[in-house]
Image (cartoon, rainbow, N blue to C red):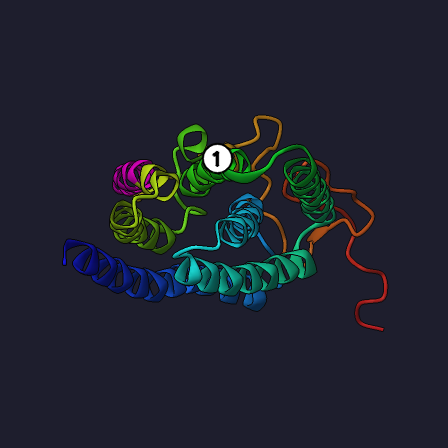
Amino acid sequence: MALFYSEYWAFVFGVIGNVISCMTFLAPLPTFYRIYKKKSTEGFQSVPYVTALLSAMLWIYYAHVKNKATLLLLTINIYGFGIEAIYIIIFLLYASNKARLSTIKLLFLTVCGYGTMVILTTYLTKGSKRLSIIGWICMVFNICVFASPLFILVIKTKSVAFMPLNLSFFLTLNAIVWFFYGLLIDDFYIAIPNTLGFVFGIVQMVIYLIYKDAIPLESTKLQKPNDHVLNICEDVPNGALQPDPNQVVKSGAPAVAVIGDEDPNNGK
């Protein structure tokens, strides 16, 4: 009877986990809608999405090898793999050349690392040892998924402008449900990382509350006045203040208007 109730509640928490995980995977939609509207990835990073993609791939492999009480784990990670792949494709479409190249390199390392792990665990390990190694690898990357939003330089820039709060919230809620699922099926490879995931989620939301009204350091640097630019806007005749079309602007500095003769073509 106790076993029946354990399996029953494991199924319940697994279904709830699938539903919340679906919402978690969809949480970045506002971010990617913003990217689509602005045709730019701005300061958003691809690290959380590539990490989540790899995590889904690892859990699919783990569920396949374990092949026991893993159906709900398998279904949600197949779904997550597809969603994360779409996000990364959108990111690559609108990223700058530098961000695109960085993401492609990260994807290449991800695929190579995953392929190497599959080959080594398939041919060099067997039975419970294989499952144990895969389980530990899954735990590490699951923790990385929870921690990855902090890699968006929140502490360094004192800004949360590019840290999605809704993603942190859903990851925290998700961690609670999957912890109980892992506990009920007696799988500490699932339970332990979700315990840490809950802690990371709380930390991220606290950081958001601390820095949500802060001005990014990069913005303050851009707003710092240039000591070499004179105020030439006073007492200048109409038409005499013109931007120099041949001036090359470097390092993101604003173009400086120059005073010169009026366009000789005016009035002709």
Give the residue drawn at x 49%, y 37%.
Answer: 128
Q: Quadrant of residue 94?
A: bottom right
| Amino acid at the residue labelled 1 | Ser
Helix, strand or loop for the magenta stretch, by majority:
helix
Q: Residues within 10 Å of mark 1 (few under 14, many from 20)?
A: some
Q: Nearer the viewer, residue 95 or 214?
A: 95
Give the residue drawn at x 74%, y 48%.
Answer: 97
- When the figure is inspected, residue 94 is found, relative to residue 156, above or below; the finding is below
- When the figure is inspected, residue 196 is found, relative to residue 178, above or below; the finding is above
Q: Nearer the viewer, residue 84 or 261?
A: 84
The residue carrying mark 1 is 132
Q: Nearer the viewer, residue 78 or 243?
A: 78
Q: Position of residue 62 (x, y in %)?
A: 51, 48
**Outermost residue, top side:** 227
Give the mark count: 1
Query: Magenta segment: does it hold 201?
Result: yes
Secondary structure under badge 1?
A: helix
Region rendered in magenta: 195-211
Q: Position of residue 225 (x, y in %)?
A: 52, 32
The reply to whether residue 256 is in sight is no
**Outermost residue, bottom side:** 268
Which quadrant of the rendered structure holds the C terminus?
bottom right
Query: Magenta segment: does it hold 112?
Result: no
Q: Position of residue 246 (x, y in %)?
A: 83, 48
Q: Quadrant of residue 147?
A: top left
Give the residue drawn at x 76%, y 47%.
Answer: 260
Q: Position of residue 241 (x, y in %)?
A: 67, 51
- When the figure is inspected, residue 25 is found, relative to residue 249, above or below; the finding is below
**Outermost residue, left side:** 1
| Left or right: 242 in relation to 192 | right
| Left or right: 231 in relation to 109 | left
Which quadrant of the rendered structure holds the N terminus?
bottom left
